[in-house]
Amino acid sequence: MAKTSRYRCSLLSLLFVEMASAAEMPLNMTQGVTDISQQVYHLHMTIFYICCAIGLVVFGAMFWAILHHRKAKGVQPAQFHESTRVEILWTAIPVFILIIMAIPATKTLIAMEDTTDAEVTVLVTGSQWKWHYKYLDYPVEFYSLLATPQKQINNKIAKGENYLLEVDRPLVIPTGKKVRFLTTSDDVIHSWWVPAFAVKKDANPGFINESWAKVNEPGIYRGQCAELCGKDHGFMPVVVVAKEPAEFDAWIKEQADIQAKAKAAEQELLAMNMTMDEAMALGEKTYLGYCAACHQAGGGGLPGAFPALKGSKMATTAEGKAAHIDIVLNGKAGTAMQAFGKQLTMQEIAAVITYERNAWDNNTGDLIQAADIHAAKTGKKE
Amino acid sequence: MQRQPDHLPLIKRLLLATALMFGFGFALVPLYDVFCDLTGINGKTSTMAATADKAVVDAKRTITIEFLARPNADMPWLFAPQTKKMTVHPGEIKLVYYEAQNPTAATMTGQAVPSVSPGQAALYFNKMECFCFNQQVLTAGQKLLMPLQFYVDPALPEHFSTITLSYTLYDMTKHAPAETVTAQVSTGGNDE
Amino acid sequence: MSTVTHDHDTAHHGEHHHHAPSGLKRWLYTTNHKDIGTLYLLFALTMFFIGGAMAMVIRAELFQPGLQLVQADFFNQMTTVHGLIMVFGAVMPAFTGLANWLIPMMIGAPDMALPRMNNWSFWILPFAFAILLASLFMEGGGPGFGWTFYAPLSTKYSGDSTALFVFSVHIMGISSIMGAINVIVTIFNLRAPGMTWMKMPLFVWTWLITAFLLIAVMPVLAGTVTMVLTDKYFGTSFFDAAGGGDPVLFQHIFWFFGHPEVYIMILPAFGIVSSIVPTFARKPLFGYASMVYATSSIALLSFLVWAHHMFTTGMPVFAELFFMYCTMLIAVPTGVKVFNWVATMWKGAMTFEVPMMFALAFIVLFTIGGFSGLMLAITPADFQYHDTYFVVAHFHYVLVTGAIFSIIAAAYYWLPKWTGHMYDETLGQWHFWCSLISVNMLFFPMHFVGLAGMPRRIPDYALQFADFNAFISIGGFAFGLSQLLFVWVLVKCIKGGEKATDQVWEGAEGLEWTLSSPPPYHSFTTPPEVK
């Protein structure tokens, strides 16, 4: 039975992918790719059919009355106005129907909340407006940002197939294994949602939540943040790639290697100096990825909400330099300005500050190097 | 108008009800904590040290404890558990350490906030000593080993096999009260 | 049903006795329940159009994928203020207006019990909304954290308009509480002789229960916004994990207010429909007593279901089950009401004037909203529905085709009584059919969009949702325009028209129909005998 339903599901998911690529919307809830998501789908359909049946009876009676019991037909109104037997009956029948509904709902819910015996655990951290994934069993962690270019959003260029549902680095998980997601947040409440897994769990700052999925089919599954989390709530998608376990193992090993090397290289990079052109190029890329959402591509900010960098005192004067490095590294408490010290490499931070101090007529000529950032981080004087 | 019934008693009662409900809104705050203590909603652990007089070790069961530590995004400290995962028998008293380091050039105050998942397991996770009971003050560059002594209540329901304990470390430098207490074990010193 | 003896010629006497000032002062100083009712209703109508204009901005932005008209943060402000205005500025004041107009006439009282407080409870409202609307023009814009203002988005991460938001919600709360006290005192103390509890019209019953709900939960809302204010400005940490608080606590407190609030916005609607259906079916309401019990049990249950808005916050299974079962249970008394209405129509002699049309639409469409509510109650399925357009569809079916349709129905139903003129039936029918078609174009496709996975409160969406959103937006604009017809009908009816009789509707029963149309300044100076 499980086999046939899986087979049917794979056919359906194929259909779904095809529909999605034609930018056509499915009209119903997805069956998803986990046993749980299919249970949820069937539960949803069961209740939907029951509602339809009740609706048919109630509205049927009502429209019958509207058609036949009208004054225009010359009928004399009856005068009955209560019947204890009928009233008890239509209290009892709904109770009975509700019990019928509650049984499968309870079963599915208990199965969904059983997070024990997971084989892979991922810590999912939401922050304004991106997701961070950290594998607890492997030395791999990364941020996952919206990959749709700003120009598509502003209608300057044609929109891509996965408009707003694409990220730079998707979460990768193995198929056929129970993967547990621990969700938390760095700032406001977010909600991590992948419809194909029937997983939607709030990310609460300071607290962890658990959910899990055992994905049956390899594929790319897309979702979005489901809890209003501020300005770019609509722009923090979730993309999960499910790979066969062997492929996953290879991938995670490769990632662990890359990240270990990057860490080692960071020390070397400290000694390396970027040229102004290098710094500006890397800085622009970093700025557009991490800063432009609030401070805007032109550095003008949004008055009252996000300060302008263009012409600002901090970004244009020599005295502002230390504060500038500090605010990028450590953020500003109580505002939307986050600490980027842990999100970006020191080289990227150096480059983005260089960019901010030289772009849009902020011509300070300052060139910041990774070593400066390291010095600021560890509190050593330059 | 012929009738002038006395409205005052009823108005008074209704105003009293309004005031009481306003108070009730605030009373929900401590009530929620009580409710959490009773039911384990949201995985809050007790902020009070537990005692282990009655604990009997149940050697037949093993529980996996996962330790998670995360400085919040705006907290520059380094913060990690020395042990990532361990198995314990219910009732067994265990001691683990977390490492914290303040890499900045200023003295800072941190507060670790615990959260347990699954939430209900929080009721059975007893901390006899925890750095999260107090704020921590670290001077520039200071490293600190922070202890956590705990046991899992043998009454933990059967269906729990793994408990995840997560700490989020917040920067409380701006809100630190004057008499802050540091933890007991410290490697101390500016060793950088 | 009831025989009434009273003096019809008291109108002139009342006016004379009061030396009522004219012009603006008349409205500013008025303590008359009809004047205040009119003020409330006109205020609600104004707010309905302001909130509606914001909905038009939202729908215009969502007409196509991409950001065209507004930026993301302004979009959030629009959804937030649209919600606040519609809930606190349109639906609630409209019901209060109806209560003011109708309760004294229905229970045989001369006026509301506390006329001066009545004046205050209305006149602070425009200030509350002026403050809220003014905050949109602040640097940094108005509140953008949703009408549910979840912490810490509304505390640590919000702009300074939050202070204005808190202040204006406080004023709205005070106004509602004063209104509720007035309703309760009036119903308790001013009922005509013989008007026993179980003889009260259902509108009076539902409003009495609503008033108790208001007194129970509006202070909790006031507490919530106060905590938000102190968390933001005065260093408390009710909702901040770092200081030992809990952001999920916010949601518990908010929804402890929020769920009864939902019933505050629907119980009076039940009362209205229960008045209209028997009139046009020419047959007494079926199951009066069970209607009263059903309303009371809905009100009581509403205090036990708040966490069904929070299934995804990570509750233990037993709590999820408890809230799921309680929520499903609400379907029972709600079902009883719908069955009773259908039974009232059964074997009646129905006619289909505009109030009846809106009431019938209410029954069908509110029930559809009830069905989606039942689906949302099922926790595992709610994980998929939560915070999607499915929810948006659900609560708009309940609030627009539910609460607002009932208010429109009430306006048509009692307008001849209030003005003394019949409204234009043809125009009214046009208004009804335009509204009915456009409102379903607007909200029905949202079910599909939600099931397909579109989250709510997003200014831009994936391409697959484009066609449906364009269609929905067209429905939205059409619904907005249709309401201009309503204004036309209202203006026309107030200005003049065919004289209305005292009873107005052939099948109408109740004390208000024994008064002249329009009724005298002081409704019943001599209490009528109710037998």
Image (spheres, rainbow, N blue to C red):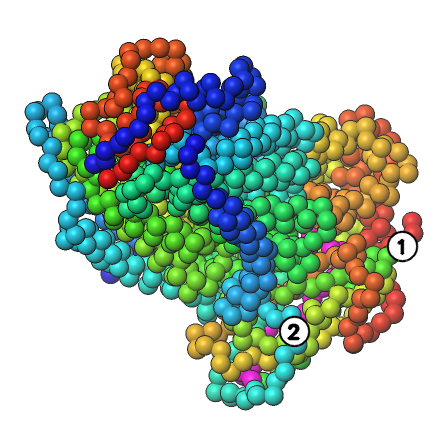
Q: Position of residue A318 (x, y in %)?
A: 90, 36
Q: Nearer the viewer, residue C66 or A241?
A: C66
Relative to residue C70, is residue C39 drawn left or right? left
Q: Which residues are magenta?
A: B72-91
The chain ID associated with circle 1 is A
Q: Are marks 2 and 1 on the same chain?
A: no
Residue B18 bears which disc, if any? none
**Which residue, given by chain and number where applicable, does mark 1 sit on?**
A380
Residue B48 bears which disc, if any? 2
Q: Nearer the viewer, residue C204 or A291?
A: C204
The chain ID associated with circle 2 is B
Relative to residue C218, is residue A97 drawn left or right? left
- The part of the image, by quadrant, that contains residue C138 is top right
Residue at 83%, 57% (x, y): give it: B104
Q: Amino acid at mark 1?
A: Lys
User: Can I make out residue A74 in this image?
Assistant: yes
Q: CA distance from mark 2 to mark 1?
A: 39 Å
Residue at 35%, 14% (x, y): give it: C493
Q: Position of residue C335 (x, y in %)?
A: 26, 47
Relative to residue A75, is residue C521 drawn left or right? right
Q: Is residue C28 above or below residue C161?
A: above
Q: Amino acid at mark 2?
A: Met
Q: Is residue A3 above or below residue A325?
A: below
Residue at 28%, 11% (x, y): give it: C498
Under tag 2, what secondary structure? Answer: loop
> Is B42 colored magenta in this rendering?
no
Q: Is residue C23 above or below residue C86?
A: above
Q: Nearer the viewer, residue C362 or C107?
A: C107
